């Protein structure tokens, strides 16, 4: 069946006029005559069976129907423009590329490596988009995304980037040396991340032990704050090894227990299915996977 939608020309004319609140200004912006723009909008009103503008002297104002159409239409035009841009630049190895990541992982693992990528691909511009949880990953915004967890991720091609060993860490001011009995760590405040509340349980289970007591301690919404809390002696934390390498190397944190938990889950590299095959995305994807393999 034929789709009952207006021409894109009429919709673009309407959006420009609604934004400018002036037909003459909108026509200049679109490089067309004011009478031609007026005919496009008149045809749109006829097709919709609604008056979209109130004409008042030199300006126009949206009616209620016009405001409703603008609210629905603007994001659709943005998405259409973005889709055509992706199509036009699909085989271009240069340009811009959006990589999604968690803030702390991005600053501690991804950012130090992007300088090397810039040297290899100087005509490629990398933008970073951050999110706090996996359900915030938007395939329309990201070209590649790094997430932690377990597949599947519908709508994405998922490839394992690297594992995620978990360590128990604390400040030297809190503990002079690593504990012999892991259960003794729960005598101290247990620092926890709001989205990873099972970290202590997972860490104990990897030793074949049940969690001896419920962890008691403050919660944090970001890993950066959780790491700082551990560094300043507020308690013991179970943290991904990749996020605390610097603090361990500099002695700001120590291993509170020698056990390293090798989790079943890990970090994954996601590519939106609709963007797979794009030259610059595939080239950067291969580079990131090689970086993750070096970290294994």
Image: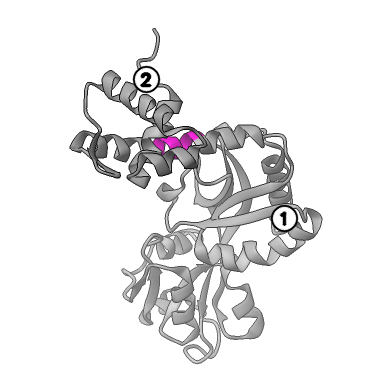
Residues under numbered marks 2 and 1 in contact, where contact means CB atoms less than 8 Å apart: no
Q: Position of residue 17 (x, y in %)?
A: 36, 39
Give the position of the N terminus as an image quadrant: top left
Q: Position of residue 185 (x, y in %)?
A: 43, 78
Which residue carries the number 1 mark?
291
Mark yes or no: residue 257 visible.
yes
The answer to whether residue 46 is magenta is no
**Horizontal arrangement in the rendering, residue 45 relative to residue 176 (left or right):** left
Q: Nearer the viewer, residue 193 or 201?
A: 193
Q: Which residues are magenta?
A: 74-80
- Secondary structure beneath dot 1 equals helix
Q: Nearer the viewer, residue 286 or 151?
A: 286
| Alpha carbon distance from label 2 to label 1 | 47 Å
Determine the image quadrant of residue 186: bottom left
Give the position of the C terminus as an image quadrant: bottom right
Residue furthest out toward the left: 64
User: Upstream in the sequence, badge 2 or badge 1?
Assistant: 2
Q: Nearer the viewer, residue 246 or 296?
A: 246
Q: Is 138 above or below relative to 181?
A: above
Which residue carries the number 2 mark?
5
The answer to whether residue 77 is magenta is yes
What's the magenta bit mostly, secondary-structure-wise?
helix
Q: Position of residue 260 (x, y in %)?
A: 57, 66
Determine the image quadrant of residue 190: bottom left
Q: Position of residue 204 (x, y in %)?
A: 45, 64
**Horizontal arrangement in the rendering, residue 94 relative to residue 37 (left or right):** right
| Crowd tier of the residue under label 1, counting other residues whose Cα lies within 10 Å: few below 14, some 14–19, many 20 or above | some
What colouring does the structure picture have?
A: one colour
Residue lying at 39% horizontally and 74% vertically, measured from the top left: 191
- Secondary structure beneath dot 2 equals loop
Residue lying at 36% horizontally and 64% vertically, measured from the top left: 194
């Amino acid at each position: 069946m034929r789709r009952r939608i207006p021409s894109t020309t009429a919709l673009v004319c309407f959006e420009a006029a609604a934004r400018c609140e002036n037909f003459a200004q909108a026509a200049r912006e679109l490089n067309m005559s004011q009478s031609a723009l007026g005919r496009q909008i008149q045809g749109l009103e006829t097709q919709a069976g609604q008056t979209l503008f109130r004409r008042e002297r030199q300006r126009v104002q949206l009616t209620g129907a016009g405001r409703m159409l603008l609210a629905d239409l603007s994001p659709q035009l943005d998405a259409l423009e973005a889709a055509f841009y992706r199509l036009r630049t699909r085989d271009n190895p240069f340009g811009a590329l959006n990589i999604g990541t968690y803030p702390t992982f991005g600053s501690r693992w991804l950012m130090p490596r992007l300088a090397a990528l810039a040297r290899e691909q100087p005509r490629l511009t990398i933008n970073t988009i951050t999110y706090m949880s996996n359900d915030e990953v938007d395939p329309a915004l990201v070209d590649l995304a790094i997430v932690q967890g377990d597949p599947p991720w519908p709508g994405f091609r998922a490839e394992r980037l690297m594992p995620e060993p978990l360590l128990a860490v604390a400040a030297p001011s809190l503990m002079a040396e690593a504990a012999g009995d892991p259960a003794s760590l729960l005598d101290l405040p247990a620092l926890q991340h709001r989205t990873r509340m099972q970290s202590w349980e997972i860490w104990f289970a990897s030793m074949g032990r049940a969690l001896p007591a419920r962890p008691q301690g403050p919660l944090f919404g970001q890993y950066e704050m959780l790491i700082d809390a551990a560094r300043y002696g507020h308690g013991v934390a179970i943290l991904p090894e990749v996020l605390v390498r610097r603090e361990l190397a500099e002695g700001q944190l120590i291993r509170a227990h020698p056990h390293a938990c090798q989790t079943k889950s890990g970090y994954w590299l996601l590519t939106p299915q609709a963007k797979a095959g794009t030259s610059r995305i595939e080239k950067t994807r291969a580079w990131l996977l090689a970086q993750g393999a070096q970290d294994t």
